[in-house]
Amino acid sequence: MARVPDRFDLWVRKARACPDPERQADYVLGALAALPYWHLFNVGTREKPQPAEGEIEGGRYLLVFSDAARVEELSGSEGSAPPPISMPTINSFPWCLKQPDSAGLLINPGEDAVLVPREHVDHFYKEWLARQASQPAGYWIPNMTSEEEDFWQENGL
């Protein structure tokens, strides 16, 4: 059965329309930063969780999901697999960046997967933290053009 696109999926589709790969990553990371929680595939146990990694072009990327249901879909074993690792977004960025062997994030593995290198995640996180102190709430993308800002406002994002 086909999955109904959620708001995060719509943000990713908008990102893919952008011709600049770095801006695409900004869009996706901005959408991820707007989520209350990140979810990671657990290859450990309930008592000793361990996040899954995927190897792509010689680099190990953390598997990050926009919602827990996507993790359960990937595991394919209802109830028998360990629960996903879910953590608040504010803790997720630094935690992911502290993983010594991680080359970056593989977001929503599957047909709509997005690969973001560690350096870009780190740069985005630093700008996000600096901006977060001055902006009480909302969705933010660094260096957004007025045309891009109009799109987000027109679509209620």
Image (tube, helix red, strand yellow):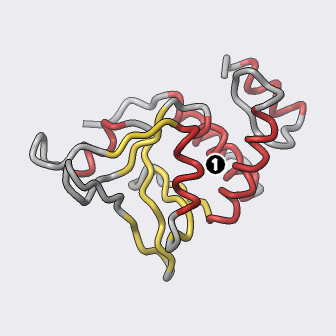
Considering depth in this image, is 82 or 74 the residue closer to the camera?
A: 82
Q: Residue at x 46, y 29 (%)?
A: 6
Residue most toward the front?
47
Q: Is residue 95 above or below residue 61?
A: above
Q: Is residue 134 above or below residue 89?
A: above
Q: Quadrant of residue 28?
A: top right
Residue 2 location, x and y as percent? 31, 37
Q: Are there few (<14), some (14-19), or many (20+) residues within 10 Å of tag 1?
A: some
Q: Residue at x 40, y 43 (%)?
A: 39
Q: Is residue 134 above or below residue 56?
A: above
Considering depth in this image, is 38 or 145 the residue closer to the camera?
A: 38
Residue 24 location, x and y as percent? 69, 51
Residue most toward the left?
80
Residue of label 1? 16
Badge 1 amino acid = Arg
37 to the left or right of 135: left
Residue 111 location, x and y as percent? 41, 53
21 to the left or right of 35: right
Which quadrant would the N terminus be assigned to in this image?
A: top left
